[in-house]
Every structure is written in C-alpha cells, then in structure tokens.
Image (cartoon, rainbow, N blue to C red):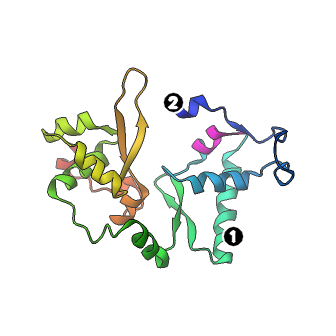
Amino acid sequence: MTEAASENPPWDLDAPPDAHAQPDEEAPVSPLRIVEALLFVGGPPLTAVRAGEIVRGLTPEQFGQAIDELTQSYRKQGRPYAVQPSGHGFVLALRPRYQRVLEKLHGGVREARLSTAAVDVLALVAYRQPATKAEVDSLRGGESGSLLRQLVRRGLIQIAYRGDANQKEVSYGTTPRFLEMFGLQSLDDLPRTRDLQQL
C-alpha cells in the first residue's frame, strides 16, 4: 500500500453521517457513487482490490455491480464518457467520438513527434515500471530528466508512487492515454520479444 493510502483511513460504508454535512449530504453515500467518484478522480486503473482498500466494506461483488450499473447508465444517458476496462481495472474515458475535445484541450499529441531519445525513455518506463529516473538514466547511459518531464506533460507517463522516507526519488509508470495512443488494451499487450525482455 502506498504511503498516501496508509495516512488516510479507509472510508467506511457503514459509518454514520458527518455531523457537519449539509442537509442534502446527510444520507449515507452509496457504493455506486463512491466507485463513480474514484473513477472520476482518475489515475491508475481502478481495481476491486484498490477500491476495497479505500472503502471499508466494499466487496468485489459490489464493485462489479457498480461498474455494470455505471456502464449501463452512461450508455442510456448518452454521456460523452464511459467506463472502460484498462489493464486489470477500469478507467473513466471519453468515447471515441469525443476524443477531439481532449486533443483540443491538451494539444494534439498525435501531431507532435517524439524524438528517438523520448521514445527510448518511454519504452524503458513501459517495460520496467515503476521505474525511477536513476534506473532510466543507468539503462540509457545518459540524463533523462527533461525527457521524463516531457512525457509527463504529454500525458504518456505519470508518477506511479513516491519513494519511502529513505528514498526521495519518484517512480514513473505509463498512463491510460499511453495505452490508448498505442492501441493497447493493457500492458500485457506490449510486444514481448527476446530483446525487449532483456531491457
């Protein structure tokens, strides 16, 4: 469990309402709405295990039911986003017909070419994640800080977790956008050749 997760106790489904809550917030929050909020926040794909760590009392069955209900509800309502499988979990993502909105907002990553060095760093992070800058530097034999920052800005990698108290360096991992840009359903779909496995 990450350091951040250990600092915040799990949300208890059976906890009494907050005494300071507004009148419309006094009712207990349903598992459906909690799962929806977790998906909305984003980050790594949400799994039943991770959701159960955050919400005490949330079973894998409840998680699955919430995912199914949200999927059907968004489809019926014609929402521009959908719950999509990613890796071993789920993410909230724009439907394909609305992808141009994302590109307009964040700039067209597809239009920008990555340098060979940036592609090398991206490949190292993809295959070795979570990978620290020191690991990437060592494998490349050169400084990678600016390339890592560039890939973070482009939404292709993200900080996977921060090191413990004795290790101040952050680790990097790929994002759902990385999977989307390269047409992958999960990291398991990355090419596996003898050369790549030796990275």
Q: Position of residue 125 (x, y in %)?
A: 29, 46
Asked which secondary structure carries label 1, the reply is helix
Q: Position of residue 141 (x, y in %)?
A: 12, 38
Task: Tell me the magenta residue range.
Answer: 50-56
- Mark 1 belongs to which amino acid? Ser
Q: What is the magenta segment's predominant secondary structure?
A: helix
Q: Position of residue 124 (x, y in %)?
A: 24, 46
Please rate how many residues cluster around mark 2, counting C-alpha atoms within 10 Å: few if below 14, some from 14 to 19, many from 20.
few
Which residue is labeled 1 in the image?
73
Q: Is residue 135 above or below residue 197?
A: above
Q: Is residue 151 above or below residue 107?
A: above
Residue 1: tell me if it is visible: no
- Mark 2 belongs to which amino acid? Glu
Q: Position of residue 140 (x, y in %)?
A: 15, 42
Near-viewer residue (161 or 76): 161
Which residue is labeled 2 in the image?
3
Magenta stretch: residue 52 in it?
Answer: yes
